[in-house]
């Protein structure tokens, strides 16, 4: 079980958010990493990951930093009762992949397993953590996301509440859905055609105001 809460901000808020995080003495700055995530759907009849009944994401992610790289296969699914609480409760299962095998894994997923490639996105992730919490500031092509995730099952709501107060955040300002929902929402609001690949070099991109 994963307990988290997410907020979105305009790009110009980055320095202010990072400054606040750096002032919290209980957090360690892990660094800034480039990530590219590709998401797939099942081609089996009645097994649509994007349906309301399943509401899950099958993701392959490559992460690259100055000194190391990693690759992860993950399954993430919103639980039906998540909207009844202040924070998101989600099912998450992760498997590590050797980064050197990233291209081969993508090839097998698309050409052998014949999974449907749905979308991809790039971001830069700024990580802060300690033994009970992980806080990420994600730089997407369309804006910033701040995510607070409890790393413990011992009063996770209390952990998240503590760091929300440290950062001056309010529950009513949180966003319950995924990055792709936010992106599609922005495209509709700003009259921009959405694309399956949300990348930094895209010709046209909506922005959080």
Image (tube, rainbow, N blue to C red):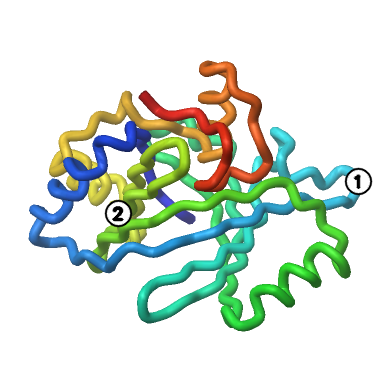
Please determine whether, in this image, residue 198 is positioned above or below residue 92. above
Q: Nearer the viewer, residue 8 or 129?
A: 8
Q: Specify whether 177 is left or right of 144.
A: right
Q: Specify whether 77 is left or right of 165.
A: right
Label 2 Cα crowd, 10 Å radius (few <14 / some 14-19 / many 20+)? many
Q: How many marks?
A: 2
Q: Residue at x 13, y 43 (%)?
A: 166
Outermost residue, right side: 45
Q: Which residue is mark 1?
A: 45
Residue 150 in the image: state x and y as whole percent. Answer: 33, 55
Q: Which residue is mark 2?
A: 135
Residue 42 in the image: state x and y as whole percent. Answer: 81, 52
Q: Are marks 1 and 2 in contact (CB under 8 Å)?
A: no
Q: Nearer the viewer, residue 173 or 198?
A: 198
Label 1 Cα crowd, 10 Å radius (few <14 / some 14-19 / many 20+)? few
Q: Circle 2 sits in a helix, a strand or a loop, which is it?
A: strand
Quarter containing the C terminus:
top left
Residue 43 in the image: state x and y as whole percent. Answer: 87, 51
């Amino acid at each position: 079980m994963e307990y988290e809460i997410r907020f979105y901000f305009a790009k110009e808020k980055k320095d202010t958010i990072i400054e606040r995080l750096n002032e919290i003495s209980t957090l360690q700055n892990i660094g800034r990493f480039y990530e590219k995530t590709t998401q797939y759907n099942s081609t089996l009849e009645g097994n649509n990951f994007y349906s309301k009944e399943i509401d899950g994401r099958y993701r392959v992610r490559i992460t690259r930093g100055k000194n190391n790289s990693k690759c992860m296969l993950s399954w993430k699914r919103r639980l039906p009762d998540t909207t009844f609480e202040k924070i998101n409760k989600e099912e998450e299962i992760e498997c590590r992949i050797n980064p050197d095998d990233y291209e081969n894994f993508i090839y097998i997923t698309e050409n052998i397993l014949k999974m449907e490639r749905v979308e991809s996105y790039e971001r830069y992730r700024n990580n802060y953590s300690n033994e009970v919490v992980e806080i990420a500031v994600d730089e997407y092509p369309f804006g910033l996301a701040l995510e607070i995730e409890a790393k413990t099952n011992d009063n996770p709501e209390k952990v998240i509440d503590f760091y929300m107060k440290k950062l001056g955040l309010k529950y009513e300002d949180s966003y319950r859905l995924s990055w792709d929902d936010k992106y599609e929402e922005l495209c509709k609001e700003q009259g921009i055609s959405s694309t399956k690949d949300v990348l930094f070099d895209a010709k046209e991109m909506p922005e959080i105001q």
